[in-house]
């Protein structure tokens, strides 16, 4: 009886490991999980990877594999210098930069945004980028006036230059990062920017009817950003912004 049980056990082991060997030979067995973002299921981008699905655990190498953007280029975009950019994870950006000020951070969302701007794949966000990322996009011929308008007020300048990656304990304080144009930010507090909402314009003195007339659409949610409304209705944000700023008396 014991011999019979042993025989059954041996056969079971052979079946399991035999299945693994066969699967491995066919390329079906994976000992490590692969990180691959979901793909768009319909529309013009059907079958292409979705930047919005990049997770905090994704490394720059995972992003390179999915979107064909070199890990070294991504590290440069985020002002990081390291011998192994491929091992940096998206969530490390939060650890390095932290929250610059309330509601302003460089993190996984910033990486998604950079990938979107670089590839032309859609990703709607209110995230921020470093000026170094914009410099990379310009150099790689991935920048235009429409993208510049979309990013208005959402570009941060790193005063301290490149950040050396060593033990992962790097972090920046607020004094090391500033807005793209801090003087203008303080002088023209009512100017229309990337984060200006319909409610902000109403607080500045414009009526909802006037705002809807300029936009050419009905506004159901006063908390919506002007930039998002333009994006959803194929309007040129730069032109719309100029019209509103004229109404507000902003030069």
Image: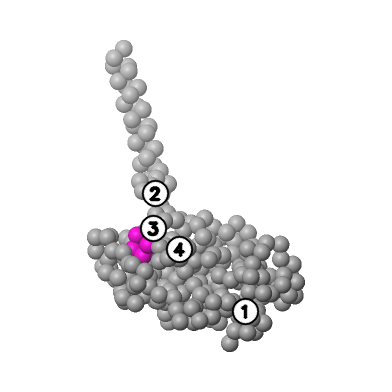
Q: Of 38 and 127, which appears nearest the observer?
A: 127
The reply to whether discs 3 and 4 touch (Cβ–Cβ < 8 Å) is: no
For the point 37% across and 40% down, the residue is: 20
Q: How many marks?
A: 4
Q: Nearer the viewer, residue 108 or 249?
A: 249
x and y, in percent, of residue 90 in the image: 39, 60
User: Magenta residues, as a range?
Assistant: 92-98
| Distance (Cα) linking label 2 and label 3 | 18 Å
Residue at the far top in the pictured view = 1
Q: CA distance from mark 1 to mark 2?
A: 46 Å
Cβ–Cβ under 8 Å for marks 4 and 2: no
Q: What is the spatial separation of the Cα atoms under label 4 and label 2, in whole angstroms?
A: 35 Å
Q: Which mark is residue 102?
A: 4
Q: Residue at x 45, y 79 (%)?
A: 182
| Residue denoted by label 2 | 33
Tag 3 or tag 2, which sits nearer the N-term?
2
Dot 4: what SS?
loop
Callouts 3 and 1 close, C-beta under 8 Å: no
Q: Label 3 to label 4, Cα distance in Å? A: 18 Å
Most prominent secondary structure in the magenta stretch? helix
Residue at the bottom extreme of this rendering? 251
Please report the residue visible at 72 percent of the width from the left and 70 percent of the height from the top.
208
> What's the CA distance linking mark 1 and mark 4?
24 Å
Give the mark nearer the N terminus: 3 vs 4: 3
Q: Residue furthest left?
A: 167
- Residue 107 sits in which quadrant? bottom left
Whether the magenta-drawn stretch holds residue 102 is answered as: no
x, y percentage for residue 92?
35, 60
Q: Which residue does the numbered mark 1 point to in the structure image?
A: 241
Q: Which residue is mark 3?
A: 91
């Amino acid at each position: 009886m014991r011999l019979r049980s042993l025989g059954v056990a041996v056969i079971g082991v052979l079946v399991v490991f035999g299945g693994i060997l066969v699967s491995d030979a066919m390329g079906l067995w994976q000992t490590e999980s692969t990180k691959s973002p979901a793909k768009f299921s319909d529309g013009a981008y059907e079958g292409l990877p979705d930047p919005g699905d990049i997770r905090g655990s994704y490394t720059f190498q995972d992003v390179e594999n999915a979107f064909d953007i070199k890990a070294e280029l991504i590290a440069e975009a985020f002002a990081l210098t390291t011998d192994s950019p491929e091992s940096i994870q998206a969530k490390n950006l939060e650890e390095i930069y932290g929250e610059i000020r309330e509601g302003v951070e460089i993190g996984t969302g910033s990486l998604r945004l950079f990938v979107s701007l670089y590839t032309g794949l859609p990703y709607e966000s209110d995230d921020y980028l470093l000026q170094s990322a914009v410099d990379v996009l310009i150099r790689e011929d991935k920048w235009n006036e429409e993208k510049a308008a979309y990013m208005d007020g959402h570009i941060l300048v790193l005063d301290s230059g490149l950040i050396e990656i060593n033990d992962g304990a790097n972090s920046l304080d607020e004094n090391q990062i500033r807005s793209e144009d801090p003087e203008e930010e303080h002088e023209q507090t009512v100017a229309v920017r990337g984060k200006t909402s319909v409610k902000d314009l109403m607080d500045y003195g414009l009526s909802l009817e006037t705002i809807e007339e300029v936009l050419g659409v009905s506004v159901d949610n006063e908390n919506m950003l002007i930039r998002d409304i333009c994006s959803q209705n194929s309007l040129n944000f730069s032109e719309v912004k100029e019209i509103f700023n004229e109404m507000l008396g902003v030069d």
